[in-house]
Image (cartoon, rainbow, N blue to C red):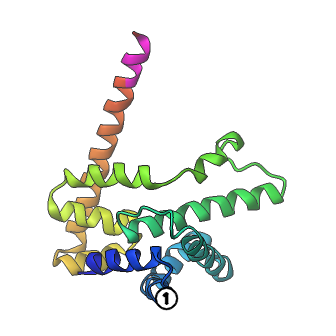
Amino acid sequence: MSEINDIALLDLLKDGDETAFTEIYNQYWERLYFMAHKRLQSAQDAEEIVQQVFLTLWHKRASLSIQSLPFYLSAMVRYAVYRHFANEQRASGRMLQAVVPEMAPAFDIDNRQLIDILNKFADGLPAKHRIVFLQHKLLDRPLDEVASELGVSLRTAEGYVTHVMQLMRKRRESLAMALLIFLLK
């Protein structure tokens, strides 16, 4: 039901409907704030990032093609947090160890491709595995909350996450091997 509501809201948003924007803001602000605060450990920085995400959403509303609003907004927050850390490190004169400076613009790429890849991967998973993966890993919802909504134990949900992560590692390794073979030819 929420997905249908999101589609209608996105259509109205594209037309510049401020009420639709306010509804999206009210539905997702708290979840996005929690996600940003979890990574930043700063209420002020988390609030600024979430406000910037919604400002960007409003400014780019006419040109956006969003398949899943929660995934899209979550990805926007994640990349905004990465940029925040990179800017913070640059300002203090230290290099961000996890990101080579030449790669920093990669954080600005359109995250629709990443979301599409993850959605295609998730489509091949069993139903409960898919729900736990999408809700916990992509939307940063607490695992115990997702488990209780599914009616499974926390231990079972942890097992689902472990299984999905193992599948992702295997898929990544097989893709790396295929790329290596391709490059060696």
Instruction: Assign a secondary structure to mark 1.
Output: helix
| Residue at the (58%, 72%) spot, across then down | 53
Q: Is residue 26 above or below residue 120?
A: below
Instruction: Give the crowd class for mark 1: few <14, some 14-19, many >=20 residues within 10 Å.
Output: few
Q: Between residues 78 and 10, which one lies in front from this camera angle?
A: 10
Q: Quadrant of residue 23?
A: bottom left
Residue at the front extreme, as displayed: 15
Residue type at tag 1: Thr
| Residue at the (44%, 65%) spot, across then down | 72
Percent of width and height locating residue 52: 63, 74
| Residue 39 shows in the view | yes
| Residue at the (68%, 64%) spot, across then down | 84
Percent of width and height locating residue 19: 47, 90
Report if residue 182 lies within the magenta region: yes
Residue at the top extreme, as displayed: 185
Residue labelled with disc 1: 22
Q: Between residues 140 and 19, which one lies in front from this camera angle?
A: 19
Percent of width and height locating residue 39: 56, 69
Question: Is residue 13 toward the left or the right of residue 92 in the image?
Answer: left
Residue range corresponding to the magenta coloring = 179-184
| Residue at the (64%, 42%) spot, across then down | 103
Question: Is residue 87 toward the left or the right of residue 67 in the image?
Answer: right
Q: Is residue 99 above or below residue 183?
A: below
- In which quadrant of the rendered image does the C terminus lie? top left
Question: Is residue 75 toward the left or the right of residue 163 in the image?
Answer: right
Q: Between residues 93 and 118, which one lies in front from this camera angle?
A: 118
